[in-house]
Amino acid sequence: MPFYWTLAIIALLCAAGYVLGRRKAVASVGGDKRRLHSLPNFYGMNVALKGAVPAFGLLVFWLIAQPLFVEWRVSSIVSDLAVSEARDLGLVMVDVRRVADGLDTAVATGTMTASEATDIAAGDGNVRERLGAAGVALGSEVSEPVLRAAQRYRALSSTGDTLRSVAVLAVLLLGLGWAYRETDGEFRARNVVEQGVLALLLGAACIAILTTLGIVLSLIFNTIEFFSIYPASEFFFSTTWFPSFGGGSSLGILPLLWGTLYISLIALAVAVPIGLMAAIYLSEYASPRVRGIAKPALEILAGIPTIVYGLFALLTVGPALMVVFGDGGLGWMQAGTAVMTAGLVMGIMLIPFVSSLSDDIINAVPQSMRDGSYGLGATQSETVRQVVLPAALPGIVGAILLAASRAIGETMIVVLGAGAAARISPNPFEAMTTVTAKIVSQLTGDADFSSPEALVAFALGMTLFVLTLGLNVFALYIVRKYREQYE
C-alpha cells in the first residue's frame, strides 16, 4: 500500500474513532453531559490519540529502519563487485537504487511488465534501452550483480511496504479498540489526554535536541576520520587550497577563512549602518502610518531566497561594479565575481535582520527615560544619541554578532557572486571563496567518501560550526551581561 494511502487511512480511522468515542461517552450517561468526568471532546481525543500515536510512531520507525535493513541485505550481493572493480560500496549501491527505481518506473509506465522486471537478465540487450525509456540515466553498463541486487532491492522494498501497511493498521485498530472499550462516563479522559499531549510536547523537544546532537556527532566522527588520514597542522596552517582527487592535495583552510571573514566584514559594513539607521528612524521618528508601511516593506528583503540574491549579484551588481572599477573605469576589477560583489549583496540581505532586531531592542527602552531626557531640556536627537542608544547598545551589539554569524554561513551569494578562487589577498575586487562554497564543491558529484578530498568538507563544516557557535554564545553573553533591567 502506498505511503500516502496509509496516512489517509490513519487520518480517517482516527476521525471515526473521535466521533465514536465522543458518542459512546455521552451515551454511557444517558445523554446527560453533566454526569461526565470530562468534556465530551476529551473522550473523542483520547480514542484518536491512542490510535494515532502508536501507529504513527511505528510508521516513522519503519520508514527509518526499512531502507537500512534492505541495503544491508542487498549489499552482500554487490560487495564482491565493489572489491573487484575497486569502487566504493556506497557508489555501487547508488547504481543499485537507480536501477531499482528504474524498474519500478518502467512497470508503472508500461515499458515492461512486473514479471519482466523480476525475471529480466543482465544479458538482455534491451535492458539499458528500456530503462532509458523509463527515464533512468545510467553512467555505465548494467552488470549482472547490479541488476540482481536491484531486483532483490525492489522485491524486499515491496515486501517491506506491504508488511508496513499491515503492521501500522493493526496497531492503529488495536489502539482505537482499546481506547473505545475503556470509554465511559467515569473515565478521566481529560487527565489522560493532557498527559498524552504533554508527552508529545516533550517528545518533540527531545527530537529537536537529538537532531542537533546527531548533526554534531556526524560532523565530529567524520572530522576525526579526516584528521586520521590528513595532518591537522597542514589543514589549519597551510595557505594553499588545492584539492586533487587523484592524490597530492593541499587542503589548507586559511584562504577559505580569509575569504569568509573578508566577505562578512564587507557585508556588515553595509548592513550595520543602514540597518541601524533604519531602526532608529522607524522607532523614534517615523509616524505610525509610515512605520506600518516602511517596516513590512523593509522586511520583505528577509523573505527573498538567497539564490535570488546570488543571481542579483551575478547579473546586476557585478556588471555595475565593472563599469566603475573595471577596465572601463579605474581598472581595479578584472571580472564581475569578486569579494566586493558578494559583500555588497550579502549586506543588503542582512539589512532587515539588523534593522528588525535593533528596532525591537530600541522599542524596549522605557518611554520614561525619553520623557526624563526631554524634561531636562534635551532635544530628540540628543535623547536618541545620549539616552536611547546607550541603553539599547548591548542588544544592538548582540544583533550585529548574530548577523555576522548569518553572514559567515551564507553559501549561494558567495557561489554566484564571489567566484571560486581560494587565495589570501587584501584586494576586495578579486575573486575569492569561502568555507561554505568549498563544502558544496567538495561534496558535489560521485565523491569517494573515504578520501581526504571528500572528508575535508566535514572538517570545514566543523570549523564553521565552532566559529558561528562561538559568535552566537558571545552575542548572548554580551546581551545578558550588559542588558539593563527596566520596570
Image (cartoon, rainbow, N blue to C red):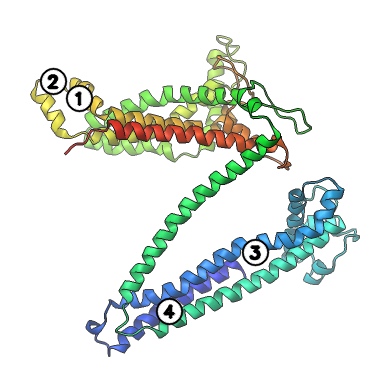
- Of the numbered discs 4 and 2, the one sitting upstream in the chain is 4
Label 4 neighbourhood size at 10 Å, few (<14), some (14-19), many (20+)? many
Numbered label attached to residue 378:
2
- At 45% across and 27% down in the image, what residue appears? 347
State the residue position of label 3.
66
- Of the numbered discs 3 and 4, the one sitting upstream in the chain is 4
Which amino acid, mark 1?
Val
Tally of marks: 4
State the residue position of label 4.
17
Between marks 3 and 2, how big is the CA–CA gap? 71 Å
Q: Label 4, secondary structure: give it.
A: helix
Q: Label 1, secondary structure: give it.
A: helix
Between marks 4 and 1, how big is the CA–CA gap? 61 Å
Which amino acid, mark 4?
Gly
Residue 107 image position (x, y, % from top left):
75, 66
Q: Quadrant of the N terminus?
A: bottom right
Which amino acid, mark 3?
Gln
Between marks 4 and 2, how big is the CA–CA gap? 68 Å
Proximity of marks 1 and 2: CB atoms separated by less than 8 Å: yes
Based on the displayed image, in which of its 4 quarters is residue 67 positioned?
Answer: bottom right
Numbered label attached to residue 387:
1
- Decide if residue 71 is on the left or right side of residue 301: right
